[in-house]
Image (cartoon, rainbow, N blue to C red):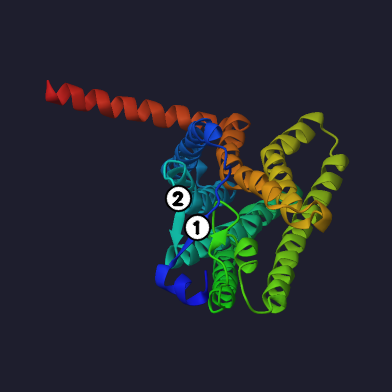
Amino acid sequence: MDKYNLKVLNEFILVGITDRPELKAPLLGILLIVYMVCVVGNLGLIILTKMDSRLHTPMYFFLRHLSFTDLGYSTAIGPKLLANFIVDQPTISYNWCAMQLSVFSIFISSEIFILSAMAYDRYVAICNPLLYTVIMSSKVCQVLVVIPYLYSLFLSLLTIIKIFIASFCGHVIRHFYCGSLPLISLICSNTHEIKLIILIFLAFNLVLSLLIVLVSYMLILIAIIRMNSPEGRHKAFSTCGSHLIVVVVSYGTLFFTYVHPKSSHSFDTDKIASVFYILVIPMLDPIIYSLRNKEVKNAVHRTWRLCLNILLKMNCKIR
């Protein structure tokens, strides 16, 4: 299809996760459950950390924004992915494709820097506990969140403009969503510049955010080793455990997707990795923080009891 016809159609065809009809129903069921758990878990954490006054601390402030970014990029792609399982010819409009890529880029970039901010927060809490409330003030926390959002917005707009001002020679996206790499493969003109921009910013984002995490945990480890009390060491490890698990899973998947050798690169491999970090990781994050955190568990119990009391009072008034 030539450029003129593509503009008239004003849409792309998505290949999807699989072209095997017998796998579509099971995949739809599994991914629907995963997405529903993701939405309920992240929305629950956002509401819980907002409602419970005992969770109004820097750590849970960052956790709330982590859940927000998880919910953001999974929702940018999840519903469309699920809807495409039940149509014969999965398509996405030109404008919605740009919007999907833009929203996904904003939230996925913001998340890795929020993970870095959480690592810095744990460093201050363990290495400078007496100055914790001073260093991690509400203004500092807001700045550590606002800057990643603004930076990610700028980066997303730059990428979108560079990609969508170009002319496309094809209309079939070899993926289940509008990713930058599948879209670049459809561009007619030289893509060296846009690839270089994406590579530079991707390397900068991953290296800088991971460096902050590694330095923070290196200092935390040194501080824990110097502790004389076994109970203090255990408490310090327990406060970092959930975040460490999330960091390892998130960065491991991102590095596998974007840094593995070209010889092993394929869109099928990308699809598997993409499903994992678009739906599975956002589902796992609230579960990890809920199962390993007593404060979150206690907050859930308090909120549940509060809701039950409200329902009982309403029931009594109705009677």
Task: Measure how far apart labels 2 and 1 are at the Cα level.
Answer: 7 Å
* Residue placed most toward the observer, 207 or 309: 207
In percent of width and height, residue 17 lies at: 58, 45
Q: Going by the image, does 43 lie left or right of 152?
A: left
Q: Can residue 11 be seen here?
A: yes
Q: How many marks?
A: 2
Please report the residue visible at 81 percent of the width from the left and 58 percent of the height from the top: 262
Disc 1 crowd rating (10 Å Cα; few below 14, some 14-19, many 20+) is some
* Image position, residue 222 (x, y; %): 86, 47
Please give the name of the residue rendered at 87% of the width and 40% of the height, measured from the top-left corner: 225
In terms of depth relative to the viewer, which is nearer, 119 or 160?
Answer: 160
Q: Is residue 42 above or below residue 144?
A: above
The residue nearer to you, when weighing 233 against 241, is 241
Q: Is residue 125 visible?
A: no
- How many C-alpha atoms fall within 10 Å of the one at disc 2: few (<14), some, or many (≥20)? few
What amino acid is found at the position of numbered circle 1 in the picture? Ile
Q: Residue furthest front?
A: 1
* Residues tagged 2 and 1 counted as in contact (Cβ below 8 A): yes
Q: Position of residue 221 (x, y in %)?
A: 83, 45
Q: Which mark is residue 280?
A: none
Picture quadrant where residue 105 is located: bottom right
Numbered tag placed on residue 89 in the rendering: 2
**Residue located at (68% from left, 47% from top):** 268
Frontmost residue, 1 versus 258: 1
Assign a secondary structure to mark 1: strand
Type of amino acid at the residue the image marks with label 2: Gln
Residue, disc 1 = 13
